[in-house]
Image (cartoon, rainbow, N blue to C red):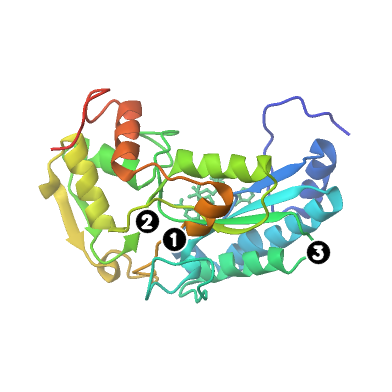
């Protein structure tokens, strides 16, 4: 058995023996399970691989956490809903419309129906704000928009998809909070504002002083012919506010914070916007 002394090690969550070994070696009190096949088209095209990562690996982690006495925090999505009547509360009935959404719902069910009682499922939506990897590598909608618009490149954005964009530091805080307070159950963690992707992009462009005419509105079907997306999705966070004391950073403040990190947008202390 190796003793954990900080740092990180790679782990393929579909490798049952490796997961078992890591659980023994680290003896964690909490496991935050973020690993997923999260891109919609690959999930649609490679369903077995999607199920292996998103569902079977999650089932195994739930069993491992149960054996270990660890708290499992699982990240899920508003893609478990069909997008006909968002934003959604925890009490709304899931009805996923693509393979990714179905796999995440199956993973939720695997955890919730397992012998593990110390679980927290945090559903979130349209995460933005992570500057790790910017401008190369893994981007989110905000950092992608900054990279493209700052270079004067046109960006296609959907006008028919509605979300409650989630500032990633808020999500990180919620994860820390549920671990610290051992809060178990299903919670929605998201921003306060219900906006279309296009409106989000325009807000960012205005805030950071980019030319919003570079934003070319398209429909979801035009942009993603390969797989459907829930259109009016997004999440209501009332339960998290009431039971966890969760408070989302207002969208403009989040954009200003991110702008400062990226060195774009209004100067520190300025009111921002136009
Ligand atoms: N981003 C959002 O707006 C959003 C919204 C709702 C829910 N979520 C959920 O939040 C979590 C993180 O999402 P994300 O946007 O950060 O997704 P992401 O960028 O695709 O990251 C997923 C991570 O999982 C890793 N992974 C894939 N297969 C793995 C395996 N077999 N073993 C170990 N790691 C594996 C990937 O590693 P590689 O890079 O090496 O492939 C990647 O680092 C996911 O569970 C997702 O469903 C995200």
Q: Secondary structure at mark 3?
A: loop
The answer to whether the residue labelled 1 contacts the one labelled 2, judged by CB atoms less than 8 Å apart, is yes
Q: Is residue 71 left or right of residue 195?
A: right
Name the residue: 79% across, 42% down: 22
Q: Quadrant of residue 273?
A: top left
State the residue lying farthest toward the front: 242
Is the residue marked 1 within 8 Å of ligand 1, measured from its CB?
A: no
Q: Is residue 250 above or below residue 257?
A: below
Q: Is residue 108 above or below residue 128?
A: below
Indicate which label's residue lies in the foreground, 3 or 1. 1
Name the residue: 43% across, 38% down: 130
Tell me the CA gap for discs 3 and 1: 28 Å
Q: Which residue is mark 3?
A: 115
Which of the numbered marks, if any, corresponds to residue 164? 2
Instruction: Please tell me which of labels 3 and 1 falls first in the chain.
Output: 3
Q: Is residue 236 left or right of residue 35?
A: left
| Coordinates of residue 80 in the picture (x, y in percent) | 50, 68
Which of the numbered marks, if any, corresponds to residue 236? 1
Q: Secondary structure at mark 2?
A: loop
């Amino acid at each position: 058995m190796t003793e954990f002394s900080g740092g990180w090690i790679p782990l393929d969550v579909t490798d049952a023996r490796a997961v078992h070994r890591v659980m023994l070696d680290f003896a964690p009190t909490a496991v935050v399970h973020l690993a997923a096949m999260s891109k919609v088209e690959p999930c649609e095209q490679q369903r077995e691989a999607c199920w292996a990562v998103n569902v079977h690996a999650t089932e195994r982690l739930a069993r491992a956490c149960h054996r270990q006495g660890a708290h499992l925090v699982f990240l899920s999505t508003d893609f478990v809903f069909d997008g006909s009547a968002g934003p959604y509360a925890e009490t709304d009935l899931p009805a996923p419309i693509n393979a990714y959404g179905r796999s995440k719902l199956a993973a939720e069910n695997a955890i919730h129906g397992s012998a593990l009682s110390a679980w927290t499922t945090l559903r979130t939506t349209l995460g933005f704000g992570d500057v790790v990897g910017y401008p190369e590598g893994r981007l989110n909608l905000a950092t992608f928009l900054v990279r493209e618009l700052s270079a004067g490149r046109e960006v296609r954005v959907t006008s028919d998809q509605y979300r409650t964009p989630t500032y990633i530091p808020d999500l990180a805080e919620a994860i820390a909070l549920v671990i610290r307070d051992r809060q178990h159950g299903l919670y929605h963690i998201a921003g306060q504002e219900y906006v279309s992707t296009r409106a989000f992009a325009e807000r960012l462009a205005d805030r950071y002083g980019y030319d919003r005419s570079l934003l070319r509105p398209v429909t979801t079907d035009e942009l993603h012919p390969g797989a459907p997306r829930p259109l009016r999705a997004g999440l209501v966070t009332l339960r998290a506010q009431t039971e966890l004391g969760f408070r989302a950073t207002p969208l403009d403040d989040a954009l200003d914070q991110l702008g400062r990190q990226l060195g774009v947008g209004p100067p520190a202390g300025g009111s921002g916007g136009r």
